[in-house]
Image: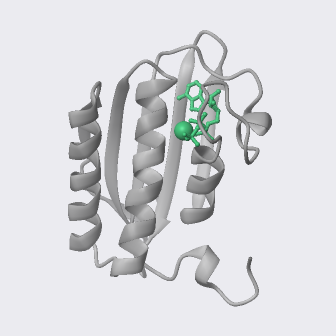
Amino acid sequence: MTSTSRQAASTSLPIGSDADLARVRQQVRQVGAELGFGLVQLTKLVTAASELARNTLVHGGGGHVEITPLDNGQDRGLRLSFVDTGPGMRDVELAMTDGYTTGGGLGLGLSGAKRLVHELTIDTAPGRGTTVTAVAWNSVLPSNRPGTA
Ligand SMILES: Nc1ncnc2c1ncn2[C@@H]1O[C@H](COP(=O)(O)OP(=O)(O)OP(=O)(O)O)[C@@H](O)[C@H]1O
Ligand SMILES: [Mg+2]
């Protein structure tokens, strides 16, 4: 941590049921609003969180999310880490491809979530589980910046 970045305590929420998914969405919306995210940014953040939490439940067999408020001295943001100890992914790039699914979904959750936040990183290995970490700031999100798709 540098002198210009501060980090508040994180909150951990379980992801083991549809009711948990609703609680995760609710908590992310509330913390994002407290950090000054506007309505559009908040909707993007909650949509990304919802997709990633659903993956933790459906593909990872359940787990938890760590919600950490961030402050870099200029903007405030959130780091969301979705953690499971499920089967992991063999090919992260393939999993990030639009339309790729092993579960009969649309295959748009991961790739869509990446476009809705500033950073998305995946730490996974077959048999070891998966941690997907998303970071979003309350400044204008990437897809709203001029010159980006
Ligand atoms: N936590 C996870 N553990 C293991 N595999 C995962 C995990 N998250 C995603 N994957 C793999 O990545 C693929 C793509 O995920 P993505 O969310 O894009 O699509 P999906 O969940 O299959 O469908 P949907 O469009 O409904 O989200 C999944 O089908 C699955 O194989
Ligand atoms: Mg999905």
* Quarter of the figure with residue 125: top right
Q: Position of residue 20 (x, y in %)?
A: 24, 35
**Camera-side residue of 20 and 31:** 20
Seen at 61% across and 75% down, the residue is 142
Q: Is residue 103 left or right of residue 90?
A: left
Compared with 120, 29 (above or below) is: below
* Picture quadrant of ligand 1: top right
Q: Is residue 2 visible?
A: no
Q: Is residue 115 visible?
A: yes
Q: In the rendered view of the protein, which quadrant contains the N terminus?
A: bottom left
Q: Position of residue 127 (x, y in %)?
A: 61, 9
Seen at 69% across and 90% down, the residue is 146
Seen at 40% across and 27% down, the residue is 57
**Camera-side residue of 23 and 122:** 23
Residue that protrudes farthest toward the top in the picture: 127
Compared with 115, 81 (above or below) is: above
Number of labels in the image equals 0
Residue that protrudes farthest toward the bottom in the picture: 146
Scheme by which the image is coloured: one colour
Seen at 58% across and 13% down, the residue is 87
Q: Is residue 20 left or right of residue 120?
A: left
Compared with 118, 138 (above or below) is: below
**Camera-side residue of 142 and 19:** 19
Q: Is residue 55 left or right of residue 69?
A: right
Q: Is residue 53 left or right of residue 14?
A: right
**Camera-side residue of 65 and 96:** 96
Q: Position of residue 65 (x, y in %)?
A: 35, 38
Q: In the rendered view of the protein, which quadrant contains the C terminus?
A: bottom right
Compared with 57, 136 (above or below) is: below
Q: Position of residue 59 (x, y in %)?
A: 52, 24
